[in-house]
Image (cartoon, grey):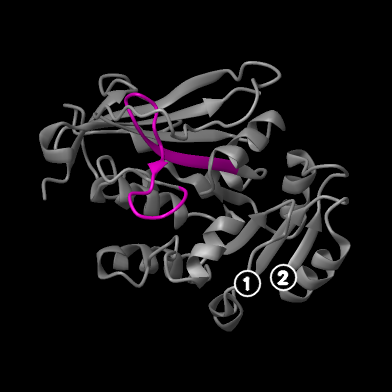
Amino acid sequence: MNDSIIQLYPSPAIEHKNEPQFYTNGEGKRPLHTLYLNHNIRRHAARRPFVYANFVTSVDGRIAVPHPTKAGLTVPKAIANARDWRLFQELAVQADLIISSGRYLREWVDGRGQEILQIDDPRFADLRQWRVERGLTPQPDIAIISQSLHFPIPSILIECGRKLLIVTSANADKERMKEMAKAGHLLIAGDESVDGVEMVKQMAALGYHAIYSAAGPKVLSLLLESSVLNRLYITQAHKLLGGRLFASILEGPLVTKAVDLSLYALYFDRMALGGNGQLFASYTVKE
């Protein structure tokens, strides 16, 4: 597999003394492997909680389309690819805590889900070693944001010693809250609904600083509305999918105020998707 991608921004011709991860061979070529590891998320998280999220999307903005055989939506097979998945893993491996959803746990229990950070996969053995060398646990802990609290707790989570955070609001069902408190650490972050500022504050107090959202558009909307998202990673696969029923990276009403982004990095992966290629973009969310 050709491991080379092309750095489009920042320009390889420009010297970035404060951002050594952007150095290239002078022609803009960089290896795909270690691309996002070199963004050094944990360095940013050393100063304060650093929240980041990641999506893969088609050019027409589809991150999920109807599942071909089951209810609900799924990542389109046309845009899912191993090169993007490698970078997803590089982001996950740097996290103290991964935010996911109740749906993810339901799919995990019934056999349709998979481990988010797949360090037992031989393809990602280097990432397992990356965490070992830094004295980190094999897997980040996991947080589930839910108002309904209607999801099961996979036994493997308890057995492997990972911590589970369950984030909800004060008006959630009290009986479900009692049950969930037995399975994990219950965070009450907000009165009527989950407040992102309070949630991240409590996560930081527990020692979580590099916080990776691998959840969907509702959680991204929460993070943006609360102004707690620091960086957004987007893989844009060069495909058009169409369809009336789909999900995009945000869900719900218009945001209260348009979110300003500044381009942090942009790369062109010309080898992906049978030569169609894809873009790897990352954005800093302006405060």
- In terms of depth relative to the viewer, which is nearer, 150 or 2? 150
* Residue 151 visible in the current orientation: yes
The percent coordinates of residue 264 (x first, y second) are: 44, 26
Which mark is on residue 78? none
Q: Which residues are magenta?
A: 51-72
Q: Is residue 104 left or right of 74 when viewed as pictured?
A: right
- Note whether 189 is above or below 286 in the view shown: below
Q: Nearer the viewer, mark 1 or mark 2?
A: 1
The total number of labels drawn is: 2
Residue drawn where x is 53% and y is 55% of the image: 95
- In terms of depth relative to the viewer, which is nearer, 120 or 38? 120
Q: Is residue 204 left or right of 98 when viewed as pictured?
A: right
> Is mark 1 in CB contact (under 8 Å) with mark 2?
yes
Secondary structure under the numbered disc 1 in the rendered image = loop
- Note whether 211 is above or below 15 in the view shown: below
Q: Quadrant of the image for the C terminus?
A: top right
Membership of 98 in magenta stretch = no
> Where does label 1 land, which residue?
153
Membership of 53 in magenta stretch = yes
> Where does label 2 land, which residue?
184
Secondary structure under the numbered disc 2 in the rendered image = loop
Residue drawn where x is 88% and y is 62% of the image: 174
The percent coordinates of residue 38 (x first, y second) are: 38, 44
Residue drawn where x is 63% and y is 29% of the image: 252
* Residue 96 visible in the current orientation: no
The percent coordinates of residue 147 (x first, y second) are: 74, 51
The percent coordinates of residue 201 (x first, y second) are: 77, 47
Residue drawn where x is 17% and y is 39% of the image: 273
Three-letter residue code for mark 1: Ile
Q: Is residue 51 left or right of 120 when viewed as pictured?
A: right
